[in-house]
Amino acid sequence: MASSEESLRKALAEKQSAVEAHGNAVRALKAAKASKPEIDAAIEALNSLKLEKSSIEKQLQAAVSGSDGDGALSREAFRQAAVNTLERRLFYIPSFKIYRGVAGLYDYGPPGCAVKSNVLAFWRQHFVLEENMLEVDCPCVTPEVVLKASGHVDKFTDLMVKDEKTGTCYRADHLLKDFCNEKLQKDLTISAEKAAELKHVLATLDDLSAEELGAKIKEYGITAPDTKNPLSDPYPFNLMFQTSIGPSGLSPGYMRPETAQGIFVNFKDLYYYNGNKLPFAAAQIGQAFRNEISPRQGLLRVREFTLAEIEHFVDPEDKSHPKYSEVVDLEFLMFPRGEQMSGQSAKKIRLGDAVSKGTVNNETLGYFIGRVYLFLTRLGIDKDRLRFRQHLANEMAHYAADCWDAEIECSYGWIECVGIADRSAYDLRAHSEHHVKNVFDEGQREGNIDCIGTNLDKSGVPLVAAEKFSEPREVEKLVIAPVKKELGLAFKGGQKNVVEALEAMNEKEALEMKAALESKGEVEFYVCTLGKNVPIKKNMVSISKEKKKEHQRVFTPSVIEPSFGIGRIIYCLFEHSFYTRPSKAGDEQLNVFRFPPLVAPIKCTVFPLVQNQQYEDVAKVISKSLTTAGISHKIDITGTSIGKRYARTDELGVPFAITVDSTKDVTIRERDSKLQVRVSVEEAALVVKSVTDGLRTWEDVWEKYPHHTSGSADD
Ligand code: AMP
């Protein structure tokens, strides 16, 4: 807990006792019929104590909400204004609205679609084109076997609780999180110790088992938010939408919860396409489906969303990146594990330092963190409200080497928008025969994998890469040779399972077995697929180390995966771009989105100043030139006042407006400064194009062209 908050809570508790003691003293004086001056003096002292208490309360409120106390309220008001504008101008709208909608499903309307397609076009340019990535496009409907191998069928779950009377479902961790946050922010009377406990619960939320979560919900007396009814115990709910492929109903499938699996299962072909060379990256943009338990927070938690994912395959023994030096000097907010654990906040760190000190696991991971930073800030995300937070040890999957989330702060708090993970060799192994055996190993060792049945899910295709040696190398190899005849005699139908389990042993296990067989002649051996121990005798398996010449090293590549939630990025971009400013008359607040030209849904509007045939003709000529130049624009020849027309386009975030007020030259107005320059009719489209293409800035244009000063751009 931040020390100021802790000391404020202590000071508040002391002041509260002092107020109570003084209150009692005043009552005692009154009961004893003390003199009026004496009572008045005591009341005055009590009032000043109350004032001091209220001042501490205010400071504490500010400390817990990280604002001036009114922050939470203004955040709500800000969000309301932004969301009203977004929905009114059809950036996005609840899907199936005329049927009262479905939670967690949204449509993008015309400007929203344009923003989304600009964001995706820039993503392709910034990542796919820049790194020569191999883009693929795989189906959303995925057979069960794929998602069984990847672990999603068994493990892609959230813990759910039900209102015991109405059956309404809630995400168990969200209820606990809301309870802790609300207590911390709104109940200033809790002790410093209680506050520390609640913060600890928040920090370890991801780590709680169903039983622990249930116990906390009971301990804190948490009930269903809508009805206050009691809640069931938490139980896992798989987030995938299930379907069946074909009419028979015999072939189960799911709508994919991520696009990555489509890339992994194609690894062999993609590796070949890339000339059997590493490293390389494949990319995919597509829809992902997650049947979220209780979606809320608008576009941030939805049941169908666009993911843009990169799978960068790299030799686990060499995670350097040829273009790492291009990002090494970037400096931005990073929030390493250590800082989180010790209650500090994110701080600016030079990326190169984070990698060289080992805070970021390797260069390639660092390279992508840097590229993601550049991508988001160039889109218009405020760099001061963007941080890279490292996963705590308890958040990371056991196979992951390191994980960082790009989190963007918006009115809902810090939101994970991009996950950047070094997933080691897990995914490729999961889909190849070899891995299935390794899963058995891990299942046996860690007791956390339901391995019975997993054996059915192997693809049989090794998803591996090879490094050819210039000279053959002599290596010592472990050879496990099960004696099938003896095993058949001993285990009959179970022979195959025992053979597979023996072959799947790793070196350490095999050598331990060898030593035990030599000393005792027999060992107990757990066969996962049989679910029991079997006795293995010396004559049933031979384990030895042999020298062999090898011409290549065959290995499973590691995968570094940046995964972008496009809807989340777009929503945060909407909030970071939104502001209001007073109208000229000062009687209303006008809404503006300050989108950079790169993402603006429409780059330019063209208005004749007044309704007049000549001006309309000029507007049409300019519109034609804009079309030829490939600039999205809108021509507005309605008779509405120019101020209203500007306000309408500011609300859509259109960066430039060309106003036709003569047949020779026109004005170009920039949205945020409202400044205008005069440009010839012939040049107008090209000036707008050069700025929207990033070839020059508005400042360059302002410098070069005569300024238009007569009247305000709002008039
Ligand atoms: P994950 O595979 O869970 O790390 O998710 C990858 C990315 O998808 C996250 O960084 C989010 O940006 C996004 N995402 C995950 N779940 C949702 C959701 N329910 N709605 C919108 N975006 C999501």
Image: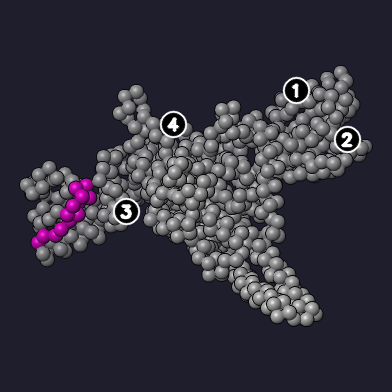
Picture layout, residue 475 above or below residue 102:
below
Q: Is residue 37 magenta?
A: no
Give how far apart the Cα atoms at labels 2 and 3 are: 69 Å
The residue wearing badge 2 is 715
Residue 439 position within the rendered picture, expressed as x and y whole percent measured from the top left: 30, 49
Q: Which mark is residue 273?
A: none
Picture layout, residue 521 above or below residue 611:
below
The reply to whether the C-beta atoms of the residues labelled 1 and 2 are less than 8 Å apart is no
Which residue is pictured at 69% across the width and 64% down the height? 58
Q: Which residues are magenta?
A: 521-533
Residue 272 position within the rendered picture, expressed as x and y whole percent measured from the top left: 39, 38
Which residue is pictured at 61% across the width and 35% down the height? 116
The reply to whether the C-beta atoms of the residues labelled 4 and 1 are less than 8 Å apart is no
Residue 712 or 281: which is nearer the viewer?
A: 712
Sooner in the amino-acid sequence: mark 2 or mark 3: 3
Q: Is residue 528 magenta?
A: yes
Q: Which mark is residue 624?
A: 1
Density class for disc 1 (Cα within 10 Å; few <14, some 14-19, many ≥20) is some
The reply to whether the C-beta atoms of the residues labelled 3 and 1 are less than 8 Å apart is no
